[in-house]
Image: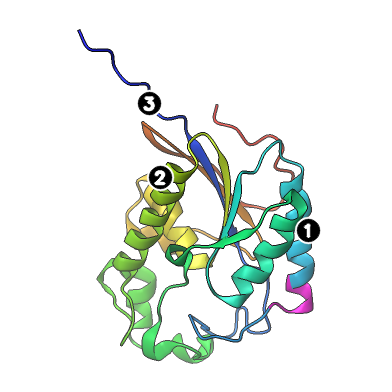
Amino acid sequence: MPSRSKPRPPTTILFVRHGQTGTTGKVLPGRAPGLHLADAGRAQAQAVAERIAGLKRVDAVYASPLERARETAAPIAAARGLKVSIEKGLLECDFGEWTGAELEGLAKKPEWSTVQRYPSGFRFPGGESFVDMSARICDAALKLKDAHPGGVVVAVSHADPIKAAVADALGTHLDLFQRIVISTCSVTAITYGAGGPAVLTVNHTGDLAGLAPS
């Protein structure tokens, strides 16, 4: 009788939202280039780097290609003696024609209700759908899992993709993902194993030393 191959050990991904920028909470910046961390965001990035540095191991640090994500990842990687690798799957959602618009004005659009209550049925004009974004971030997570079996990986991304990854890991419908809160420089930890994902913490801003599957 052929022996069964041993399943790969689970991989833990620490999803980190980038630090605060000058437009956080005011504008939908999307993928527009040239947006950097504010002073407060740089302080947040340093603080989360110190928290992650206290973990027993970190095998790799990945970041979305956007400046605010790379600038958040830099001190995390430096604290562990690692380099930042760019992963396009961690990119912010492509907001298309809404890129750069003020949130206050967008909230008055009739489509805004769909964005909040039926995101699975919405595509940004000239941009990406939430369904496509969810598939992209989940594919990126599986790619990192396969690249680092049994490891701990930091993935610096953006609020909506991280919320979508959490919803997928919990088996929650995408139409409910807006109920998940992901603050700047918070840590969301998901372990990916042979039996599927398990969510260890969401929007965590405290000590990370106790993170482990039960």
Residue, disc 1: 47
User: Quarter of the image containing the N terminus?
Assistant: top left
Give the residue drawn at x 74%, y 61%: 75
- In the rendered structure, the answer to whether residue 131 lies left or right of residue 71 reads left
Q: Is residue 144 magenta?
A: no
Q: Tell me the tag on residue 142.
A: none
* Residue 151 location (% of width, % of height): 55, 38
Give the residue drawn at x 60%, y 79%: 25
Q: Earlier in the sequence, mark 3 or mark 1?
A: 3
Label 3 to label 2: alpha-carbon separation: 22 Å
Report the amino acid beneath label 3.
Answer: Pro
* Residue 127 location (% of width, % of height): 33, 82
- Residue 117 in sight here: yes
Label 2 to label 1: alpha-carbon separation: 28 Å
Q: Is residue 38 magenta?
A: yes
SS state under label 2: helix
Label 3 to label 1: alpha-carbon separation: 36 Å
Residue, disc 3: 7
Looking at this view, name the residue that lies furthest to the top: 1
Give the residue drawn at x 78%, y 62%: 46
User: Quarter of the image containing the C terminus?
Assistant: top right
Residue, disc 2: 170
Q: Which residues are magenta?
A: 37-41
* Residue 24 location (% of width, % of height): 62, 79
- In the rendered structure, the answer to whether residue 84 lies left or right of residue 130 reads right
